[in-house]
Amino acid sequence: MKMTTFSKRMIKAFSTLFLSFMICISVLFLSGCAGKSASGTSTEGGQNANTTTEDEAVRHAVDFNHALDDYQPKKDHYSFYFTYKTVHPWWDAVALGMEDAQRQFHDKGITITYEYMAPNGASAVDQIQRLVRAEEGGFDVIGVDVADENVISPILDKMVNEGYKVMTFSSSDASEECKRIAYVGNTHNYEDGADLTEALCKKLDYKGKVAILVGSVGAPCHEDRARGARDTFAKYKDIEVVAVEYDNDSVDKAHDLTMKILEDYPELDGIVCCNMSNPVGAARAITEKGSKTVIVGMDHDKEALHYLRDGVIYCLGVQDCYSMGFDTIDIAVKIADGNMPGELFEEKTNEITTVIYQKDAEAMLEILYGEVS
């Protein structure tokens, strides 16, 4: 079977993640893993108030228990092209789910090959260039994690009009009116930003000076979370937003921006971080400064989880990247066969976000990284 093309760095990352995956399967089997939820959850009563225990909510944050359905593909070989915003461990986790779906199709006698490519820094211009090259590759489906909604959506419309089968995936969909066939990923980025910000406001007793680190300009997921944060802050008259900065999904830039904000506002009370990199950069800066600023942010970076465990970060919204990857490959096969959203798959496949707190950090580190204290 032809293997997917990755850089040496990504192959090394996948090896580490696969080891974590095998540990996770054992942990989840012992704990009685259930199927995935259709909406976000919180271990402190966030989006989805259900009857699961706190430990179960954490263990279901990432669902490794996936199996292909009964759909019979029309071909025995498919070739896909996926491009995403930037090379980053977050998308390595998405790719792990893709690899699992690829293996399961192989077990059924169906070969899936795909390219999974991104630049070292988020760039809509770079993404356009990659899409132009993909048009010449004879791929069954082209999948896009949208770098900039306003710039990329018209390009996707043009591709669909020219007969290409285009889907979006991961964390960023195209614009609402875009002609892309389907989206697999986070459909509630605005709500994630609002939920994290509400948790911060409650922690601050609804008063104080706060800042927002967004991410990449134009990236739908980052912008939507920041919009959710701004709208939530606006509800409370004693909350003042003193800075909104874009860190381009860079830990180092997030660190530098946070240091500058803290210099301008030494008594900064809180900061909302809208991607996976900026909670780490912000936490490094706050630790260096000895600040008491409360951080809320996104995702499962190992260093961020350590900061959560140590009380430097207050809470994190963890997305189910694994399910995003698995479902993307599954649905891409169905799209390649000419199916449209309906009975076989939805136009938007929603993947969950789980808000976790300090008490949840050890369990999440064990599940994702095999760390046992």
Image (cartoon, rainbow, N blue to C red):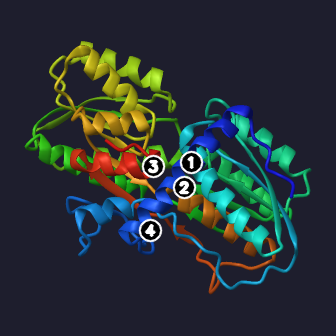
What secondary structure is found at the residue carrying circle 2?
helix
What secondary structure is found at the residue carrying circle 4?
helix
Q: Position of residue 156 (x, y in %)?
A: 73, 55
Q: Position of residue 163 (x, y in %)?
A: 85, 65
Mark toward the viewer: 3 or 4: 4
Identified by mark 2, the residue type is Met
The reply to whether dot 2 and dot 1 touch (C-beta < 8 Å) is: yes
Residue 49 versus residue 279 in the image, above or below: below
Quarter assignment of residue 40: bottom left
Q: Residue at x 64, y 68 (%)?
A: 182
Relative to 223, 19 lies left or right = right
The reply to whether dot 3 and dot 2 touch (C-beta < 8 Å) is: no
Q: Position of residue 212 (x, y in %)?
A: 33, 34
Which badge, 1 or 3, is on the more N-terminal residue? Answer: 1
Task: Say which mark, if any, is on residue 22.
Answer: 2
The reply to whether dot 3 and dot 4 touch (C-beta < 8 Å) is: no
- Circle 3 is placed at which residue position? 368
- Crowding at dot 4, Cα within 10 Å, few <14 / some 14-19 / many 20+, comes out as few
- Between the residue at mark 2 and the residue at mark 4, the CA separation in whole angstroms equals 11 Å
- Circle 4 is placed at which residue position? 29
Identified by mark 1, the residue type is Leu
- Circle 1 is placed at which residue position? 19
Residue 282 in view in this figure: yes
Identified by mark 4, the residue type is Phe
Toward the viewer: 12 or 112? Answer: 12
Relative to 73, 372 lies left or right = left
Mark toward the viewer: 3 or 2: 2
